[in-house]
Image: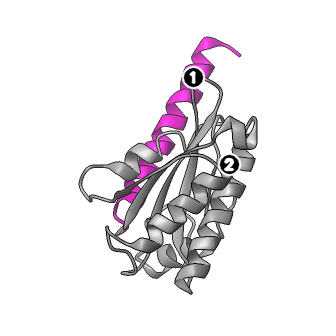
Amino acid sequence: MPVREAKAIALQQRTASHAFGHWIEHVDWDLRLVITFSPSKLGHTSHDLALRRVRDGMNWLGGYLRGPVAWLAFTEPTMTGHVHVHALLVLRGRWRPSSALLRKWNAWWRRRNGYVRMQKYTKGLAGAIYDAKYSGSSETEWDCSNAFTDLMRSQTPKPGLPAENRCRVVR
């Protein structure tokens, strides 16, 4: 591929990632997660396996809360070749910083997968924009819950972004 064409594609990917980040920044996120996977627990973790594990973890959390959790997760390649994930969650008022539930979920996650850092989401610090930074790249994948899709549908649609599609892993 010629250098000029490669640069044009890279610019399109960065532009798409930035636009998507700004679009999701307006959501009232409750929690931000940075998830790593332990090679001793899972061996080499592909992007697809990482997102399946995240979906399992969010389903566990939703089952415990007796309701769906709206979430959006992005894989990110690292220099070591290991995958880690950035995830954003909307718990709809069911989360408190000292919640025993989240400590329990954290322990459940660590036993099965590796490390997770949980932070209360702070609007205005551009966390969603940062988390979406590779969303337009072919080196990453993303996934979200149907509850997130429903949440986005209930809000005013942004021009040029399809509201009718369910979330799916994007390659």
Name the one closer to the observer, 153 or 126: 126
Quarter where residue 44 is shown: top right
Residue furthest to the top? 3
Going by the numbered disc 2, the residue's amino acid type is: Ala
Q: Which residues are magenta?
A: 1-27
The reply to whether the magenta stretch includes residue 26 is yes
Mark 1 vs mark 2, CA separation in Å:
17 Å
The C terminus, quarter of image = top right
* Residue nearer the viewer, 136 or 148: 148
Mark 1 vs 2, N-terminal side: 2
Task: Assess disc 2: are there few (<14), some (14-19) or many (≥20) residues with their C-alpha within 10 Å of its C-alpha.
Answer: many
Which residue is at a point 66% across and 13% down the rendered structure image?
Answer: 2
Q: Which residue is mark 1?
A: 79
Residue 39 location (% of width, % of height):
69, 36
Q: Please, what is the three-letter code of the amino acid marked with disc 1?
A: Met
The answer to whether 116 appears left or right of 165 in the picture is: left
Q: Is residue 39 above or below residue 153?
A: above
Residue 50: mark in rendering:
2
Pinpoint residue 170: horizontal percent, then vertical percent: 68, 51
Q: How is the image coloured?
A: one colour
Residue 136's label in the rendered image is none
Residue 68 point in image, percent of width and height: 57, 80
